[in-house]
């Protein structure tokens, strides 16, 4: 976790993957869960959208491919957390 935070936290990242689910986050804003497709003790990455992209969540569908520009936020219990994501 320390090494991952040092490498990715507060850095701009280009992320691509498939949507596993779209959930209501802690503040009821959409939270996108991406498929990890690996089993190395890592959970599916979770991404919150930038305020400018919140309305775009309504048109997203489970299983679709997605590309986003995000900011690395943290890692919690093996789950990468991304924030301020903008759909490309």
Image (tube, grey):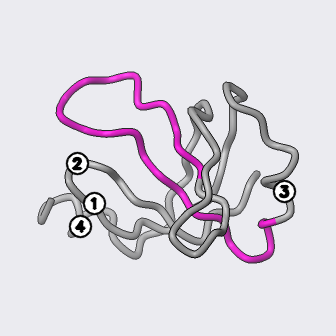
Name which of mark 1 and mark 4 comes first in the sequence.
Answer: 4
- State which region is magenta: 32-54
Residue 45: say if magenta: yes
Task: Please rate how many residues cluster around mark 3, counting C-alpha atoms within 10 Å: few if below 14, some from 14 to 19, many from 20.
Answer: few
Q: Residues within 10 Å of mark 4 (few under 14, many from 20)?
A: some
Residue nearer the viewer, 45 or 72: 45
Left-right relation of 11 to 27: left
Relative to residue 36, is residue 25 depicted above or below? Answer: below
Q: Which residue is mark 3?
A: 56
Cα distance between the residues tagged 2 and 1: 6 Å
Which mark, by number, is residue 78? 2
Query: Considering depth in this image, is 3 or 49 the residue closer to the camera?
Result: 49
Crowd rating for badge 2 (residues with CA inside 10 Å; few <14, some 14–19, many 20+): some
- Residue tagged 4: 5
Labels in figure, total? 4
Q: CA distance from mark 3 to mark 4?
A: 28 Å
Point 33% across, 70% down: residue = 9
Front of the two marks 4 and 2: 2
Which quadrant is the N terminus positioned in?
A: bottom left
Residue 34 - label? none
On the picture, is 39 further left or further right than 52?
A: left
Task: Determine whether, in the image, residue 23 is placed left or right of residue 4.
Answer: right
Camera-nearest residue between 82 and 25: 25
Residues marked 3 and 2 touching at CB (< 8 Å): no
């Amino acid at each position: 976790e320390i090494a991952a935070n040092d490498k990715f936290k507060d850095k701009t990242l280009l992320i691509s993957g498939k949507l596993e689910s779209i959930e209501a986050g802690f503040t009821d804003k959409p939270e996108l869960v991406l498929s990890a497709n690996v089993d190395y003790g890592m959970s599916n990455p979770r991404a919150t959208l930038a305020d400018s992209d919140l309305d775009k969540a309504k048109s997203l569908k489970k299983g679709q491919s997605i590309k986003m520009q995000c900011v690395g936020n943290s890692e919690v219990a093996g789950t990468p957390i991304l924030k301020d994501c903008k759909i490309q």
